């Protein structure tokens, strides 16, 4: 090779190296500026409040900006496309104009770009594989959102109007304006369950639960979220019905708890229906968010009570004053010794506990005490400053306190004795207050009716059996002090052999009187009373009587509906052989059957007398000489009161009781 040839080759090689270097200087920045649009994730369009559309897409790798074109197909059908909008976007999003057509397909074409410099100049490289999506930009629509509450099922049904094929988001709208997504739905309408087993709790009082629904549309390569948002709200009252139901739970000692369901309305009223007039008496008002319960407190024994619960306020039932239909509950009480007055027949020991282990004092026979409870066969009795347990079998209990209206009571010995000899008055006995009964009559409520507690419990069976047949026991006498027994006997014995003054006859004409034995033709008390087969001792005890033990009663039957007495062969307390059970009429025999079936014995000479022989044998009650009075401390659900002998209470006064100063308010309650 010649020297010239070598130089030419070298020069050509250098030129080639220069060209290669120049190519590399241009190609390398171009290659490094390569970017590519992601093809998998769909585009997203969000309608803005002003009608514009925010288009967003996944960012391309190493892109500096993007070129967006919105192209419309031309009507000639030859595949030509007109550019409706174009923009260069520095972020992977772009705001589209609101005026883009909604009724024709549009192509959204997005191409990424990369900027680079070489040889002192700036160049732009378009990204590979531009993203192109054909779609309609008609906006998802939603309207007429409404919420219906099924109160019985605690469910909310949401319904709205939307475009076929659209999907929806259901939100819970929070108090701060934010929203919590509850469901994504592919259909119109939704059901939400509330309550303890549901998705949401039932709203609290005063709380509003607001739902929001918006629509979105999914097509190939694009998701379009509409701006339209509908809201609907529900409140607690929407879940509540218009029918009240109530439950009545029996607590101890004739105390009842009324509870009821929650209904529409702003408040509840608890009323008691007056049994005579039927007029409701307001007892309490309970706020809509209050505790739906009413404690009746201790109720009198064997009484019927009807309570009404009504819901008022708010949206009421058409044509009424009620937000929910009222409900009534009727209950009947039983026997209860709570707050009853008791007396001991003799001084009786008190104990610190119902087990009777530690003696703490004495229950004095001369006093009336109040029962505060019963446990283990013992009464808890007391005063504001003393309490103790006493054997209940040693106590007489006031029947009116213990069994109330189960029986009726007319203790005539306390105001006008009925004792006669077959309609003839007995001087100093008939129409008098019998000795020993001076403290029995009460100014405000009939009279005291003491009876030994075990005997009183036995009486309930007889009274209920009689009541089932439409009758009721009327008690004329129960405990009778021994001094009364002796007084009646002695006064009657004094006149037994005396002629009966005709003017003392008080009844109808008697056709079956015995023939007088005296030559002057005048009948004596003894002749009318005994008829030869009985004596005074058959009717009146000369020493002790079962009445003195608190285990006997003089009683008859009355009709429960009108309280009229059934006719017996004689009047009550007719001290004569005409009253003997051998002369019983049908009514007297019926009375005997009721009482003997309950375990009571009787006397041959008196159809009205019944006694508890089993109690005498089991408990050996003491024979009490003196009578009883009402005076003593009384307790009720409100507090302590002091009852005087006539049954009235100390009111708005100060009084020394058992050496202690006591002050009472205007209602008679002790001011502690």
Image: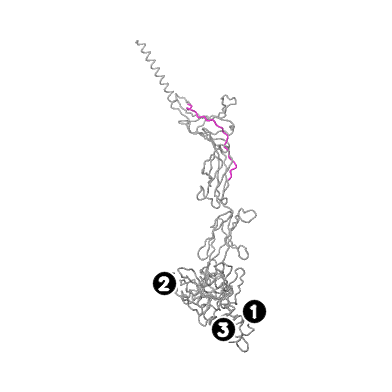
What percent of the width, then of the height, locates residue 512?
A: 62, 81
Secondary structure beneath label 3: loop
- Point out the stretch of residues depicted in magenta: 125-146
Q: Where is mark 2, residue-wise?
A: 358
Comparing 448 with 553, the one in front is 553
> Can you tell which mark lies on residue 508?
1
Q: Residue furthest bottom?
A: 519
> Can you tell which mark lies on residue 256?
none
Q: Earlier in the sequence, mark 1 or mark 3?
A: 1
Does the image show residue 496? yes
Secondary structure beneath label 1: loop
In the picture shown, does residue 266 fall above or below 609?
above
Q: Where is mark 3, residue-wise?
A: 532
Q: Earlier in the sequence, mark 1 or mark 2?
A: 2
What percent of the width, then of the height, locates residue 532?
A: 56, 84
Neighbor class of circle 1 (other Cα within 10 Å; few <14, some 14-19, many 20+) is few
Secondary structure beneath label 2: loop
Comparing 284 with 591, the one in front is 591
Q: Earlier in the sequence, mark 3 or mark 2?
A: 2
Queried whether the magenta region covers residue 83, the answer comes back as no
In the picture shown, does residue 482 fall above or below 181?
below
Label 3 close to label 2 by CB (< 8 Å): no
Neighbor class of circle 2 (other Cα within 10 Å; few <14, some 14-19, many 20+) is few
In the picture shown, does residue 559 fall above or below 526?
above
Comparing 527 with 212, the one in front is 527
């Amino acid at each position: 090779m010649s020297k010239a040839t070598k130089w030419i080759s070298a020069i050509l090689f250098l030129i080639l190296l220069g060209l290669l270097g120049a190519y590399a200087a241009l190609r390398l920045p171009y290659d490094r500026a390569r970017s590519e649009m992601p093809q998998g994730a769909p585009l997203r369009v969000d309608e803005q409040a002003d009608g514009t559309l925010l288009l967003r897409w996944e960012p391309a790798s190493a892109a500096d900006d993007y070129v967006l074109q919105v192209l419309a197909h031309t009507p000639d059908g030859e595949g030509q496309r007109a550019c409706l909008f174009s923009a260069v976007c520095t972020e992977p999003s772009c705001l589209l104009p609101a005026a883009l057509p909604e009724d024709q397909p549009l192509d959204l074409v997005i191409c990424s770009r990369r900027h680079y410099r070489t040889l002192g100049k700036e160049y732009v490289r378009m990204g590979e594989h531009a993203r192109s999506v054909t779609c309609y930009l008609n906006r998802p629509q939603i309207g007429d959102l409404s919420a219906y509450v099924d109160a019985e099922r605690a469910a909310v049904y949401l319904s709205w109007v939307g475009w076929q094929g659209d999907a929806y988001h259901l939100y819970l709208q929070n108090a701060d304006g934010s929203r919590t997504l509850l469901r994504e739905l592919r259909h119109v309408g939704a059901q939400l369950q509330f309550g303890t087993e549901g998705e949401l709790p039932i709203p609290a009082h005063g709380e509003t639960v607001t739902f929001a629904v918006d629509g979105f549309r999914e097509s190939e390569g694009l998701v379009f979220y509409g701006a339209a948002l509908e809201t609907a709200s529900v409140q607690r009252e929407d879940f509540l019905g218009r029918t009240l139901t109530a439950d009545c739970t029996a607590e101890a000692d004739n105390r009842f708890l009324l509870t009821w369901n929650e209904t529409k309305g702003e408040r509840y009223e608890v009323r008691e229906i007056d049994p005579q007039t039927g007029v409701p008496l307001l007892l309490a008002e309970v706020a809509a968010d209050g505790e739906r319960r009413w404690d009746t407190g201790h109720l009198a024994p064997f009484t019927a009570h009807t309570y009404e619960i009504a819901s008022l306020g708010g949206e009421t039932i058409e044509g009424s004053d009620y937000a929910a239909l009222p409900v009534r509950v009727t209950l009947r009480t039983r026997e209860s010794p709570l707050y009853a007055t008791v007396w001991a027949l003799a001084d009786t020991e008190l104990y610190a506990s119902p087990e009777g282990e530690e003696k703490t004092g004495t229950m004095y026979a001369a006093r009336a005490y109040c029962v505060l409870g019963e446990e283990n066969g013992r009464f808890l009795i007391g005063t504001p400053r003393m309490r103790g347990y006493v054997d209940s079998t040693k106590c007489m209990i006031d029947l009116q306190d213990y069994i109330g209206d189960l029986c009726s009571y007319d203790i005539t010995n306390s105001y006008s004795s009925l004792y006669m000899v077959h309609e003839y008055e007995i001087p100093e006995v008939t129409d008098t207050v019998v000795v020993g009964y001076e403290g029995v009559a009460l100014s405000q409520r009939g009279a005291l009716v003491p009876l030994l507690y075990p005997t009183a419990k036995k009486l309930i069976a007889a009274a209920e059996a009689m009541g089932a047949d439409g009758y009721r026991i009327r008690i004329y006498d129960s405990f009778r002090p021994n001094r009364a027994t002796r007084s009646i006997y002695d006064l009657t014995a004094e006149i037994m052999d005396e002629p009966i003054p005709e003017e003392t006859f008080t009844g109808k004409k008697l056709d079956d009187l015995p023939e007088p034995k005296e030559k002057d033709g005048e009948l004596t008390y003894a002749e009318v009373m005994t008829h030869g087969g009985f004596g005074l001792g058959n009717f009146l005890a000369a020493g002790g009587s079962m009445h003195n033990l608190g285990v006997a009663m003089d009683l008859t039957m009355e009709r429960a509906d009108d309280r009229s007495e059934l006719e017996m062969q004689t009047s009550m307390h007719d001290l004569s052989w005409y009253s003997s059970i051998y002369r019983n009429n049908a009514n007297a025999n019926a009375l005997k059957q009721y009482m003997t079936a309950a375990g009571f014995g009787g006397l041959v000479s008196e159809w009205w007398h019944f006694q508890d022989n089993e109690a005498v044998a089991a408990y050996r009650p003491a024979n009490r000489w003196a009578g009883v009075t009402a005076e003593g401390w009384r307790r009720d659900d409100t507090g302590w009161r002091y009852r005087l002998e006539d049954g009235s209470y100390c009111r708005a006064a100060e009084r020394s009781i058992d050496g202690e100063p006591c002050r009472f308010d205007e209602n008679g309650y002790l001011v502690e």
